[in-house]
Image: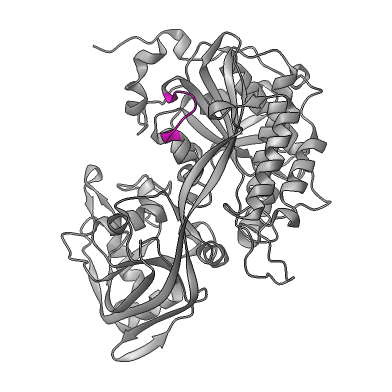
Amino acid sequence: MKRSIPFLLLSLCTSPVLATDIPGGGISADNLSRHVRVLASDEFEGRAPATPGEEKTIAYVVGELEKAGVQPGGRNGAWTQDVALVRAQVDGEVSAAVKVGGALQALANGDDVVLQSLSPVERVDITDAPLVFVGYGISAPERGWDDYKGADLKGKVAVVLVNDPDFETAAAGAFDGRAVTYYGRWTYKYEELARQGAAGVLIVHETAPAAYGWATVRASGLSPVFDIPRDDAAQYHTRLRGWMQRDLAVSLFQRAGLDFEAEKRRAQTAAFAPVALGDATMSAAFALKRDQVVTRNVIGKLQGAQRPDETVIYSAHWDAFGIGEPDASGDTVRHGAIDNATGVAAVIELARVFAAGPRPQRTLLFMALTAEEKGLQGATYYAANPVAPLEKTAAVLNIEMLSPDGPNRDIASWGKGRVSLEDDLKRVAEAHGRRYSPDPNLEAGFFYRADHFAFARAGVPAITVGAGLDRIHGGVASGKALRDAYFARCYHQPCDAWTTAWDASGQVQDVELLYALGREIADSRAWPRWLNGSEFKAERERSETERK
């Protein structure tokens, strides 16, 4: 029998919280801009985890939360939560080559390929490993899909496509059309190929299905990689992993007597089976430097006045990519201004205005999370080691990449979450004379690329909120052009920096909506929920009795 759901579970309070209701003088553009300017300055060295830049970042965020008037939210009165990670990076030169038909082609790391490893070894040494094309590298029985068909990949390097089989097809198939699923993420490809026993993985980079250019792959791939400590790391990771340029893939297929585009079309069907790239083999050798590090989440707390055991979380990741190769201007600092000093600035400012006003009924946590850029590590650690019970965490409102380009008519969330929070954000936006735009770029897979995903996997209703595209000055065309230019030139690059042209007025409007939404949830007895069709609904329902 279908259970009836009390009305209180279906909606939050509908009395709008307007900008004039925000305490502490309201959301300040000067504060938001100041926080970004400081966090994205050269002094903070690109905010990489487990570096001097982290120490400065943690000190700044803790200091600002203290000044805001919230209390430490970690265990035993601490402001921080330690997150233990394994850090691995290439140590010295990388030797890499492919051999086809007896002819050897040297590969330049960073230009032709980007190679790395999280395998628990001191040196990666692969010699003449056969190259095998495995399509999109997906094993999804529930979708009737198996790209492997029992192929033996032991000792071989798999060549795999990024994104899902539906991305370039004329009609939606087993994978939700152009809206990428978790099977389309590069993280899944690596994990699945390790389960399949491959010695290595090379993902073919194509800008549209990856949603970023080679410069982003290079910047990310040449940086240290991180993982949680694992007893079974050798089984969890292939010895070699990385990306290859599309032109290299096309050439390898051609020399193997195969047509890259034709093989890709074959991979878009459930009948696909792996195919060897002729006699092509790959060799790679490089030393690895591995160590265990401790990085930190920052947690501030405002205890609820009536139901302190129930929690609402505001979060943003503080990390960026540290110091890397110089750009055309000679700048080596990947400043991470938009991504994601804007989110941290919003969390600090929200803490200030909430602390200045009446105490909410539920407890609020204000989090600056670590190592998002390294695979959502800080959020994943918190979800496994929460300071407040997840079953009584009402919602996570994660904040990412607010706009420096002035006000928009709309606000957006990342991905298609199938969560009531999306409807709540829409209602709050409309109450403020704005509108909610669903993610306009579902094919980029942003739902799986932000910290809210770690909470969602644990069942907690969660969304990531970011800027819309419909600019007051220039409309959607202008907003899209600015976004596309940012991802083409500055995403994970030194030019993601604060400048004197920074216009935080749009950020103010977005943070006002985040305040209004969070205030409603914090003062409500309602519980946001996953909707039918969500893969996280069952996990949440397992703890339903805790919320009675």
Question: Residue visible at 75% across and 53% down?
Answer: 41
Q: Position of residue 526 (x, y in %)?
A: 49, 13
Task: Report which quarter residue 78 is drawn in.
Answer: top right
Is residue 223 part of the magenta span, yes or no? Answer: no
Image position of 76 (left or right of 478): left
When the figure is inspected, residue 237 is found, relative to residue 100, above or below; the finding is above
> What's the magenta region?
383-390
Image position of 328 (left or right of 98): right
Instruction: Tally the numbered discs.
Output: 0
Is residue 386 part of the magenta span, yes or no? Answer: yes
327, 167: nearer the viewer: 327
Instruction: Please identify the dominant SS of the magenta region.
Output: loop
Question: Residue visible at 23% across and 71% down?
Answer: 155
Quick one: which residue is furthest to the left in this view? 150
Q: Position of residue 119 (x, y in %)?
A: 36, 62
When the figure is inspected, residue 511 is found, relative to residue 208, above or below; the finding is above
When the figure is inspected, residue 9 is found, relative to residue 257, above or below; the finding is above
